[in-house]
Image: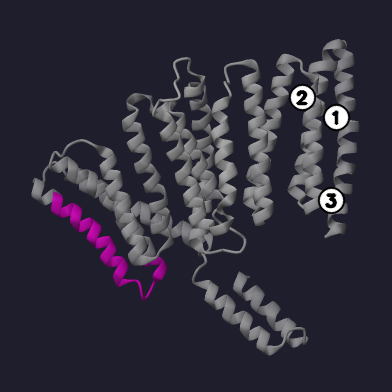
Amino acid sequence: MPIIERWESTLERWSGAGLVSPELAQRVRAFEAERAGTRLPGWPVLLALGFGGILFATGVLLFVAAHWDGMSPGARFSLVLLLVAAFHAGGAASSTRSPLFATALHAVGTVCLGAGIFLAAQIFNLEEHWPLGCLLWAAGAWLGVLLLRDWPQLALSAVLTPIWLASERAIAVERSWERDVVLAQGLFLLALVYLTAHERSNTHAPRRALSLIGAIALVPCTVFLFAALPHSSYNNPDYSPATPSLFASAVALTLPVAVGFVLRGRNGWICVPAALWVFLARLFDSDTKYGELGLLFWCVLGAALVTLAGVRDQRRVVERAGLVGLFSATVGLLWWADDYKKLPIYFFCLLLALAVAGLGVRFIKKDAINLGVVMFGTTVLFFYSSTVMDKLGRSASLIGLGVLFLAGGFALERTRRRLLGRATGAA
């Protein structure tokens, strides 16, 4: 049954039972009708429109590419203009009958604008500075935001603008952009800001689109950041405080914070500690023993902050992102403790697991309780395999490992059920 029919039938049942007055029921219907235009459509509709628009645009571009060599420069430029204009004209013509279809056509038209910009530069042999093309493309997307007020235009603008800034930075540092920690930190922080753009009190479609973009971009941005950290300027013997990278770092961290304040208003203050946390990553040299340990503790701190931000905003996606980060950092700490035989790290991981489970009980979060139990069992398993197993014979170690899985698994499952029951009772 569709969601609208479910809440309508529930409201009718409550009205019939006298639990809700007719005036209140009418106000609920008016409120939901007002919010209906700001929601994203269901995922089947989005999937069909998205893939349909992409396939249609790809087919048109392939057809143009097949006949490109036989066209004169004037015909090429005219065709490029016709493609961009045709999609937007089709969107304008269908806006009254099918708003979703019109939104998809306008989005395809904005995508074709980028292809038209770069093809025009190729036609007229313009000076090669491809970041300028990204700037023009982003400007076209922002113009679409002003004229159409569609969330796909905003999503394209939110992606194209950082691409333009990143491309300018890549040109500035020439071939070492893949080792540029300034660029990596800026993109990573912006992904976090996008991820937290969707608050519980604001469910508009543009916020949800930005949050989805942030969730998708967070993984590659994290990989990029960890790949660039070993080449950080602070870890370079030739580094001088007067180098321009300090200004570049300030810009890379300030712009995402400004975006956070624009998106969240007063609640944008949470982006300030996030920027400070991202900046602190440059203090650790991952090529050294304790530098790697410091970087792992940095990951624990950041994942904890993301989890608390998700709890504060009542966003389960953000909570899960932070919990996944906590588990990954815990496994990294356990690997480090296994390599260097440091027992205090095991105790820290046990305390961290207890803290996560306690957080789940305190705020009634089942995901945190389950993860805390898993982290506790993982820590015990690492400790046994690295410290106890080496001191026993082969058969004794295997018997002990089996007993650990059977008895420990049973005890952890009982503990998990008790914690879940305590959290449910508190609710």
**Residue 199 at x, y percent in the picture:** 59, 58
**Does the magenta run of residues contain 96?**
yes
Task: Name the quadrant containing residue 102.
Answer: bottom left
Q: Distance between the residues labelled 1 and 2?
A: 22 Å
Q: Considering depth in this image, is 64 or 159 the residue closer to the camera?
A: 159
> Disc 1 on helix, strand or loop?
helix
Give the vertical position of 128 relative to 264 (above or below): above
Span shown in magenta: 77-102
Q: Residues within 10 Å of mark 3 (few under 14, many from 20)?
A: many
Q: Residue at x 89, y 48 (%)?
A: 418
Specify whether 78 is left or right of 28.
left
Q: Residue at x 50, y 47 (%)?
A: 257
Provide the major secondary structure of the magenta segment. helix
Name the mark on residue 345. Answer: 2
Q: Distance between the residues labelled 3 and 1?
A: 22 Å
Q: Considering depth in this image, is 350 or 262 the residue closer to the camera?
A: 262
**Residue 26 at x, y percent in the picture:** 62, 85
Q: Mark 1 points at which residue?
A: 405
Q: At label 3, which amino acid type do we have?
A: Leu
Q: Name the residue under label 3.
A: 420
Give the vertical position of 394 relative to 107 (above or below): above
Q: Residue at x 33, y 61 (%)?
A: 144
* Quadrant in which the N terminus is drawn: bottom right
Q: Considering depth in this image, is 165 or 22 the residue closer to the camera?
A: 165
